[in-house]
Image (tube, helix red, strand yellow):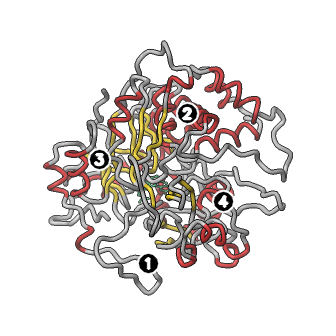
């Protein structure tokens, strides 16, 4: 069992899809801080990299070390194109995740997260974590197992209540079958019989016999309240080694405000007193914790530590550094906006089909713009954010509020639920240069997320140099010039 390293002051936050890729996590981990890869949609990342010819050979180098050769053979046979894909052609997709565990999809997910962690850990002895969203239920067990096969040191999961994850880590470390109870949307009038359905992973199905036991990584749930942290510590089905406490200013998805829904003039959710995390209560839990959400400055790191945190988790500053997976032209556009003082981030309560508020950067050509959003033909072909619902016949179905409206309604969904919902799955693949060209020839558009503190990346841009590295971010954050922490300041403005 791994303990959490209380001496690591910085966790580079997990950023999906593959914004926090192996290159970024490796750069951070090799400097002695915690580098985190994103395991979300990792099978799609893998198969698209293979179809682009894996020009540097890194993916195939990691695949050659994977312990289950059948999956490697299958992945190469189905997806690898030595010359790369013809420009303008459609990527062949990984099968969509399903509760019944499609073997190919699970195999590709195990392999994809193995590759990402293997490469992030290559060539140094630093520590690497994997980030997953609890809400994305179906592929998570496979992503966890693949990362553990590569020796992942940490698992970080938010966007939901990851109560069953610690027990699954214990079992997967011994290659034993693991299950998560499925969170199912019950439609009005549909009766429910029998035990709650689960999604399962059976390592033996992939050839795990004879494999040595794996290291059980440290588990750090990402929480937005001390009460959730305390509940998880008491009621999770295994051990928790620490927490990330994330506030509503953080990039990505945010926890919704507590209490009545109130919106400001721009339609953004308003957070209040009840959303402030009591850091003394966090200290009382006795586990290390890291604060996230606009903590990307040396002053904020010192403040966090003065309040008993081990350090901070930072995403936005790392998202735009050289090593991150963001498509270079997108990085350049945003950096230009930052330098020009025009960059803006909005907390959109509708964009994500998960129903969680999602931070969106206003970016020309992205679905943050109404005309680009409206011009896109709705399609659901990746399916990571689909909710599982109970069909009239008692069986299980899948639906997403961003899918074609008629399809969603045919599955018992309300039209109002679809308004303003965006296809994050496809957009996030575009952000990292792996966007789909759909069969009708249309190219998917990006949708970028960042924290409210995005303008602060200007502090990393030096005269005459509009880029910076992960090392620059760490040097900046770990600056040791003493500045007194303001007395009585409230930190941990968590959701
Ligand atoms: C581009 C981007 C993508 C993110 N994606 C995820 C994600 O997939 N899972 C997650 O738990 N957090 C995600 N986050 C949140 C970060 O892990 C981190 O907690 C957050 O960025 C910290 O606050 P900051 O944005 O003010 O630095 C994302 C953040 C950014 C900027």
Name the element at disc 3.
Answer: strand
Label 1 to label 4, Cα distance in Å?
26 Å
Q: Can residue 462 be seen in this view?
A: no
Is the shortest distance between ligand 1 and the CB of mark 2 under 8 Å? no
Ligand 1 shows up in which quadrant of the image?
Answer: bottom left
In the rendered image, the quadrant that contains the N terminus is: top left
Image location of residue 206, percent across then percent down? 56, 25
Left-right relation of 476 to 387: left
Q: Using the image, determine if residue 462 lies above or below residue 110.
A: below
The residue that disc 3 covers is 243
Query: Of discs 1 and 2, which sits in the foreground?
Result: 2
Label 2 to label 3, Cα distance in Å?
25 Å
Q: Residue at x 64, y 64 (%)?
A: 333
Is the shortest distance between ligand 1 and the CB of mark 4 under 8 Å? no
Image location of residue 462, percent across then percent down? 53, 56
- 10 Å neighbourhood of mark 2: few (<14), some, or many (≥20)? many
Label 4 to label 3, Cα distance in Å?
34 Å
Q: Residue at x 51, y 31 (%)?
A: 146
Q: Are circles 1 and 4 on residues that touch, CB within 8 Å?
A: no
The residue that disc 2 covers is 110
Which label belongs to residue 418? none
Numbered circles on residues, count: 4
Which label belongs to residue 268? 1
Which residue is the extreme one toward the right? 86
Label 4 to label 2, Cα distance in Å?
23 Å
């Amino acid at each position: 069992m791994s303990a959490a390293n209380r001496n690591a002051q910085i966790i580079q936050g997990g950023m999906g899809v593959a914004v926090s890729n192996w290159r970024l996590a490796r750069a951070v981990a090799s400097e002695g801080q915690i580098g985190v890869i994103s395991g979300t949609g990792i099978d799609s990342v893998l198969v698209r990299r293979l179809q682009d010819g894996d020009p540097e050979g890194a993916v195939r180098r990691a695949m050659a070390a994977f312990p289950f050769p059948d999956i490697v053979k299958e992945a190469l046979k189905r997806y690898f194109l030595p010359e790369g894909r013809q420009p303008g052609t459609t990527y062949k997709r990984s099968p969509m995740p399903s509760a019944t565990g499609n073997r190919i999809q699970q195999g590709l997910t195990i392999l994809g997260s193995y590759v990402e962690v293997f490469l992030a850990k290559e060539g140094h002895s630093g520590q690497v974590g994997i980030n997953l969203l609890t809400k994305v239920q179906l592929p998570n067990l496979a992503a966890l197992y693949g990362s553990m096969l590569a020796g992942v040191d940490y698992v970080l999961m938010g966007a939901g209540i990851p109560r069953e994850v610690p027990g699954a880590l214990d079992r997967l470390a011994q290659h034993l079958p693991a299950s998560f109870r499925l969170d199912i949307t019950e439609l009005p009038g549909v009766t429910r019989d029998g035990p709650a359905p689960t999604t399962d992973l059976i390592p033996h199905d992939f050839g795990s016999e004879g494999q040595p036991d794996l290291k059980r990584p440290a588990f750090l749930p990402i929480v937005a309240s001390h009460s959730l942290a305390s509940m998880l510590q008491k009621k999770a089905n295994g051990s928790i080694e620490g927490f990330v406490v994330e506030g509503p200013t953080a990039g990505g998805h945010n926890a919704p405000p507590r209490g009545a829904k109130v919106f400001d003039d721009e339609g953004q959710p308003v957070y209040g007193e009840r959303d402030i995390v009591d850091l003394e209560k966090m200290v009382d839990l006795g586990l290390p914790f890291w604060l996230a959400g606009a903590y990307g400055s040396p002053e904020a790191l010192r403040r966090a530590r003065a309040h008993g945190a081990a350090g901070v988790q930072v995403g936005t500053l790392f998202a735009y550094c050289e090593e991150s997976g963001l498509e270079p032209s997108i990085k350049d556009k945003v950096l230009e906006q930052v330098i020009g003082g025009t960059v803006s981030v909005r907390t959109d309560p509708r964009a994500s089909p998960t129903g969680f508020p999602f931070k969106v950067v206003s970016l020309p050509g992205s679905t943050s713009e109404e005309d680009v959003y409206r011009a896109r033909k709705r399609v659901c072909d990746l399916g990571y954010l689909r909710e599982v619902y109970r069909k009239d016949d008692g069986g299980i179905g899948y639906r997403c509020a961003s899918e074609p409206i008629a399809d969603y309604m045919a599955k018992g969904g309300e039209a109002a639920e679809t308004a303003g919902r965006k296809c994050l799955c496809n957009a996030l693949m575009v952000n990292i240069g792996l966007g789909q060209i759909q069969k009708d020839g249309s190219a998917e558009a990006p949708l970028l997320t960042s924290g409210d503190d995005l303008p602060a990346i200007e502090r990393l841009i030096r005269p005459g140099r509009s880029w910076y590295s992960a090392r620059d971010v760490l040097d900046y954050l770990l600056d040791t010039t003493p500045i007194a922490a303001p007395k009585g300041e409230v930190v941990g403005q968590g959701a």
